[in-house]
Image (cartoon, coloured by chain):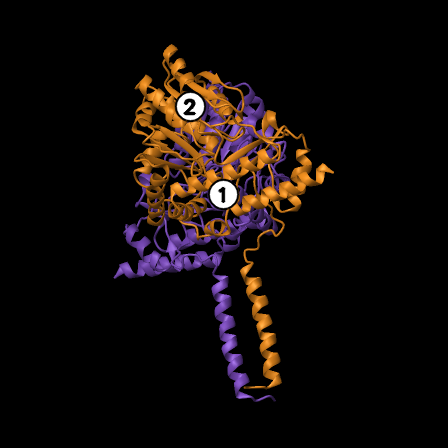
Chain colours: A purple, B orange
Amino acid sequence: MHNCSYCTSSLLALNFVLFITIQTVRNQPMRNDKHKYLVIPGPVEVRPEILDAQTEWMIGHRSTAFADLFARLQTKLKQAFLTQNRVFVHGSSGTGLWEGASRNCIRDEARVLHLVGGAFSERWAQISEANGKQVDVITVEWGKAHTPEMVADALKKQTYDAVAFVHNETSTGVTNPVKDIAAVVRQASDETLVLVDSVSGFLGAELRTDDWGLDLVLTSSQKAFALPPGLAFASISDRVLERAKQIKHRGYYFDFIEINDSLQKNNTPSTPPVSLMFAADKQLDDILAETLERRWARHLQMRDTTLQWANQRGLAAFAQEGYRSPTVTTVANTIGFDVDAMAKFMGGKGFSMDKGYGKIKGKTFRIAHMGDMQIHTLEEVLSGLDEYLESVKN
Amino acid sequence: MHNCSYCTSSLLALNFVLFITIQTVRNQPMRNDKHKYLVIPGPVEVRPEILDAQTEWMIGHRSTAFADLFARLQTKLKQAFLTQNRVFVHGSSGTGLWEGASRNCIRDEARVLHLVGGAFSERWAQISEANGKQVDVITVEWGKAHTPEMVADALKKQTYDAVAFVHNETSTGVTNPVKDIAAVVRQASDETLVLVDSVSGFLGAELRTDDWGLDLVLTSSQKAFALPPGLAFASISDRVLERAKQIKHRGYYFDFIEINDSLQKNNTPSTPPVSLMFAADKQLDDILAETLERRWARHLQMRDTTLQWANQRGLAAFAQEGYRSPTVTTVANTIGFDVDAMAKFMGGKGFSMDKGYGKIKGKTFRIAHMGDMQIHTLEEVLSGLDEYLESVKN
């Protein structure tokens, strides 16, 4: 054995230098080490490798490299939406595509039926009105789902250009029976488009665009898709485009005809958020590798774990039984603890918590279990909440 | 001296390992090594440190951390726009804010005057029409600027809710005399808003929002701002908001009243592209450290270098003398060389070149000298072009 003491100490010193150097270099780019894991229902936690995927060198949006990127996304998005329809990739939040859906699908002389049961379904109806459309609503109490029967009744009394509703109401944690509602609409009239907001459902809750006959399904990047915000997506049927052609003032930024014309050339009418599209490209690979079925099952498992936990702690689900969301549980704060104090306590544990939304803020809080969250992380969250509940018992 | 041969070889081997390790780790995230530097007029080249700034951990847009980020951006953007007005930060391309300007500033019964002299000023006018607005245009030949006199004449014949024009027409390389046109509009009527698109001017060409009396200046992230695309910005005067209140159907995604209400709380109506805002935060620090004056001077120097080069090579500037853009030179291809072949040749040198836009494609090509490009990079581009011109002479 070689026993030179100089060698030994040199090697130790060098090992130390090597270790420090790797740590230093690895931390470029340096992320905030006080980060709290996002348990809020969007933006959700984004994995480091997806954050890093944004940093590819910029490319021109009229380049071959961009067309290739766009085509790859198109193929993968069709698999993710389970559709043969084209899927728009748009530089906006989901809110923007609400406006697009309203402007492109409802003729001026016609009416739209909005199903309202929470903050977000209500806002979409307001957006149709803000664009001068004639709106009827079926309103249910927050926490309740819409039933196919309600919709069938309404369609007997009035013909609509579209029925617009949410798959998953992010404020209440209710998942609507999309398949059954769509079937009722399809049966009632060939003129009525089925418009679905799946902002907080897509890639977390089962959604079968073509099997269920959905004309338009819109979503955004920062919910169960687990991407940074800034991109919105929508699957668009031929019927939607036929309708759009009959409407004169569709505007431009959300003009479905313009967007579709560009899409045929693997392009967009104006410059899109390219770095976010790089991230989407990688994230879709990972999602399709997991498979939709396993992803949906993972979300259901997290939902069930959360509901069981809430029941055992004397808390309740805010959403009606049978319609509880796989992606976000709105917990009715039946114990009446201080939600702000809970959030502060959980912040100390490294988790960023929600405190309820809109008119049910404080009376409820939401546990988002969506995106790339794994069951073991959810269990850490719930065990942190247990510690908090224990601490306020005394 | 210590002369153990085992030590010496070990140290050499370890040094090698250290070197390889650092190189490997440093390349995470790995960027495409076939990247071509973007000489196109947007998206422009983004520096690695700005690309990396996108990778900060995601945060909720209703968090204190987000409000702090928003407030920082607000302070710095006011300095960048040279304004006391609020500056909107929006998740869209500049095209989206065209739509916002048209919908919020033109009453249904009133008219807007668009100054058209290239592909982009023309599209903005079309967008006003697509939103049902009554549009008049003053059209000049591509390559020409609009004069204050033209605008003064038009304002004598008709009252307008707004005059909408571009600071810098990206297709032709013309910079309009914004200050003088604005002065004419301001003098003509208190009812007429001055709406300026500075998509490819802002942070490259001199622009003084308040001194020049500009009610609205809109821009996007991927031109002389040198950020990834996906964000748009607009400075908004009180007069604009007063006007917006008089318009019923402003829509929602670009509703200036909604955006302004949220802005008061350092927030946005819907989820914004947070990772791009991290990048903007850093980029604004660097831009303000350079100072606006030095940044404008650097762009002018690059413009002059490009014009001189073009003249000496028997090429010509497409834009009218006296109105040539500091950020992009549209070169009239008076030699008649094959622009596609030139772009291919330059691609081999590591540069992504433009081949002209719209109806002057091929007859012109554009050299973008904007954003964080330095004069030495431009000189490499021009010397590459010289090699190409030399190669086709024979």
Question: Is the residue A328 above or below the residue A16 in the image?
Answer: above
How would you rate the neighbour count of disc 1 (Cα within 10 Å): few for under 14, some for 14-19, many for 20 or more?
A: many
Which chain is home to disc 1?
B
Image spot of residue A391 (x, y percent): 29, 61
Q: Residue at x 58, y 51 (%)?
A: A286
Disc nearest the viewer among 1 and 2 = 2
Q: Nearer the viewer, residue B159 or A88?
A: B159
* Residue B153 image position (x, y, % from top left): 40, 13
Query: Quick one: SS at disc 1?
Result: loop
Q: Is residue A347 left or right of residue A90?
A: left
State the mark number for residue B309.
none
Residue at screen point 60% across, 24% down? B359
Determine if residue B220 is in view: yes
Q: Is residue A386 left or right of residue A257?
A: left
- Identify which residue, A306 or B387, lies in the foreground: B387
Q: Are marks 1 and 2 on the same chain?
A: yes
Looking at the rendered image, the quarter that the C terminus of chain A falls into is: bottom left
Q: Residue furthest right?
A: B394
Residue at numbered disc 1: B228
Residue at the disc numbered 2: B164
Q: Amino acid at mark 1?
A: Pro
Q: Chain of mark 2?
A: B
Residue B390 falls left or right of residue B135: right
Label located before the other in sequence (1 or 2): 2
